[in-house]
Amino acid sequence: MPDEQREEHGAAGALSGERVSPPASFVEQANVSDPGIYDEFEADWPECWAAAGDSLDWETDYDRVLGGDGPPFRWFEGGRLNASANCLDRHLEDRKNQVALQWEGRLGESRTYSYLDLHREVNEFAAALRELGVGADDVVTLYLPMVPELPIAMLACARIGAPHSVVFAGFSADALATRMDAADSEYLVTCDGYYRRGAPIHQKNTADNAAIEREGDVEATVVVDRLGNGAPLGDGEYDYDDLVAEHRGATVDPVPRAASDRLFRIYTSGTTGEPTGVRHTTGGYLAYAAWTAQAVLDIKPEDTHWCSADIGWITGHTYTVYGPLALGATTMLYEGTPDYPEKDRVWDLIERNAVDVFYTAPTAVRAFMKWGEEYPDAHDLSSLRLLGTVGEPINPRAWRWYHEHIGGGECPIVDTWWQTETGGAMVSTLPGVDDMKPGSAGKPLPGVGAEVVDADGDPVDPGETGYLVLTRPWPGMPESMAEQDGWFAQRESVRPSLERFDWAYFTEDGATVDEDGYVTLLGRVDDVINVAGHRFGTMEIERVLADVEGVAEAAVVSGPDDLKGEALYAYVSAAEGVSEDDLRAAVHDAVEDAIGAIAVPDVVVFTPDLPKTRSGKIMRRLLEAVTHGDDLGDTSALRNPEVVGEIESALDDPPT
Ligand code: WT7
């Protein structure tokens, strides 16, 4: 996090006592406006979560809200339901002609699906998937950009009980192959290509390359024709439109799933070199998605909700697809970028679609702020009722700008803290109940157990820095945690002592808490870097760099970035006689090939050597301090102190 933001978080941010109350007009209409909800949930835990479970339609009612006093935890035990039926069928009676999905294409085209339309197309595609051989529990990989076929395919999978695995469209062939192999997935839905910043991206070629690299076989590949070129199809490859046309009018009965059956898996970066597969359940996840969408995002069936995150990430799964559709609202999907054709594109879309709730990343807010208020000022944004942010801390200055220039001073802002693992928001103000403190996410949601503790696991005093731990199970927990006995952490070595809890999950985030219980997040304490709200494991990138010919050694750390919050800095020492320019290009290409363009380091710094301890370990903390221009602290353990000066001068004199 840049220093300016760090300071703002501490001194001028949440801890300064700045408070903003939600306007009375918002509170009056809010889904949740009774402050008693915190005590009620506390007094009635875990039964309080029936509020979430009962918001869904069950094929077979559940026997218990939470089965198991200890792991394995079974939320809504005994219940059976289907996620697609909850997102579609149950809305047909009351709102079949209401818009379910409003798609806005990159080139100004749009498509509107009513609940009836979406129900029809999901059924037809579900029938097609079945005919291709997809059965319950077969993993279907969805490698698609932001086109309507992506949520349609997700719901079609859910309908037949086949877990989906959405792989972000910007990932490389290698990354796709790794994820398909890890999920043992034999079915793929992709597209011929799509446009990004004016240039066609040939997605199918990338998918073909992945198929070559894969260990497992691909049974069937479905190709959405997005470029309109009618890409040639080989054996086992099917055109999406043809398949749907062949199944015109087909209906598929939603397959009842046990609450704890898997709805999907999604890959995220962890502290190991390999991406981590997070598996979410049908009942617990969906109930939690719906409950948080109504309590935190205040979504109502008549609302148009726009979550700008790509569906390739958990945010899009929960708050573009499952949450809003479970509630019967209109969800908007935007294919393009915020600055094309003009920097007012987002505000134009909000105005034209009368968006009620807008949910985006602080990085985007900082970009909007940099572009200037003339862009939002040129549009009528009065349809907006609530604003949200997710993925990284929002610095108070950006918060105030968002509040004033987008919300007109009248929309509460929810700064929602959560993770791929949590399935839905965990720490946030309730917009109809709580005051907001710019820079602080707020309190743990009702029923959520979260504490900021020191290394011994004891609660820290207000204002002190500690570790954020989740101390109780919640419905949106992933399978791995539900099954785990004792304490859950991605990496045992860095977790605080959690002995005093029966069960706890260490989030790997640093945080402070104030006297009102508001949590202010301070960033990851592990080797994961959060760039523009996307998570990168440093090891994952370092492994790629280490394999580049000419690289002797490399380390990736977090560096400052005004817009993105954090940036990826790669420190590379070159082998003897290798040209830095060539190596820079090779590093760029290698990361793009292995992971994707989003993981290419923002800054590559060449250094004759990396700072090391006497035992030869790279001192990452020191590298990070140098990168941020922070005080270096105790450097006595350093074997090669002279490299610090060399790195500092390389940083002062960045390559152009
Ligand atoms: C990490 C999780 C939740 C979906 C998007 C990211 C950071 C997330 C906030 C917030 C400060 C935040 C944390 C967390 N993070 N939301 N409101 N304030 N930091 O999901 O890729 O799993 O990343 O994002 O560091 O651990 P993810």
Image: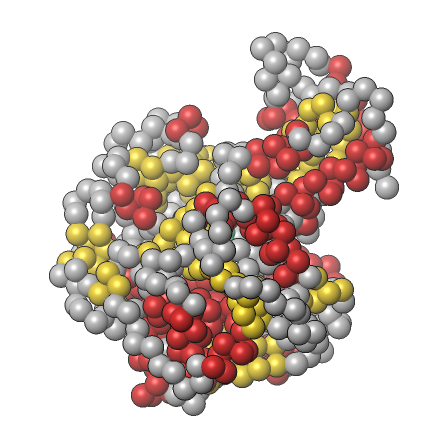
Q: Position of residue 289 (x, y in %)?
A: 37, 63
* Residue 244 visible: yes
Which of 30/556 is in front?
Answer: 556
At x 68%, y 46%, the residue is 592
Q: Where is 79 relative to 605, above or below?
A: below
At x 70%, y 62%, the residue is 201
At x 57%, y 68%, the residue is 223
Q: Position of residue 5 (x, y in %)?
A: 62, 45
At x 46%, y 35%, the residue is 465
For the C terminus, the quadrant is: top right
Which of 264/521 is in front?
Answer: 264
Q: Quadrant of residue 257?
A: bottom left
Q: Is residue 602 rendered to the left or right of residue 460? A: right
Q: Position of residue 187 (x, y in %)?
A: 47, 59
Q: Position of residue 560 (x, y in %)?
A: 68, 41
Q: Quadrant of residue 71?
A: top left
